[in-house]
Image (cartoon, rainbow, N blue to C red):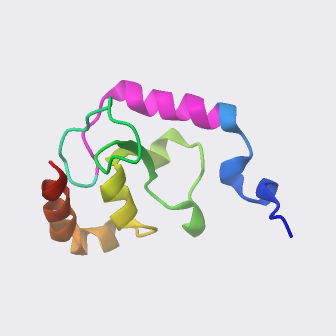
Amino acid sequence: MARDRRKNPRHTNARMEKITRERIRARGDVCAICGKPIDYTLKKPNPMAFEVDHIIPISRGGKLYDMDNLQATHRICNERKGNQLDDERDAMHMSLTTSCDLWS
């Protein structure tokens, strides 16, 4: 049985997702998790590539396209952060910084 992708808010509006991603990319921020520069020319699946992170995860009630809820991160940092909030992430900050160093 096929999954109904319309139920997942991440699959509802590809145009809005692209616009939001480009706005975050245009700011040229450093990684909000590890604080290191992001090479915006890298493409996925490179672990140091740019990825948009939701500060308050969608699974915890965060808004999908709210610019105040979005930040630039490395793929590896965002993957390791998972659906944690900032205060939970602070406890694991050292392990994220160390793992990011491995890919530099």
Relative depth, front residue between 28 and 80: 80
Look at 26% across and 34% down and name the residue there: 39
Q: Is residue 80 left or right of residue 1?
A: left
Specify the quadrant that holds the N terminus: bottom right
Identify whether 61 is placed above or below 38.
Answer: below
Relative depth, front residue between 45 and 13: 45
Residue 6: percent from left, percent from top: 80, 54
Residue 83: percent from left, percent from top: 46, 68
Look at 30% across and 57% down and name the residue there: 77
Identify whether 58 is placed above or below 71.
Answer: below
Identify whether 75 is placed above or below 29.
Answer: below
Look at 83% across and 64% down and name the residue there: 2
Q: Main secondary structure of the magenta part?
A: helix
Q: Which segment is the magenta one?
A: 16-32
The answer to which quarter of the image holds residue 30 is: top left
Relative depth, front residue between 53 and 101: 101
Q: Is residue 12 left or right of residue 103?
A: right
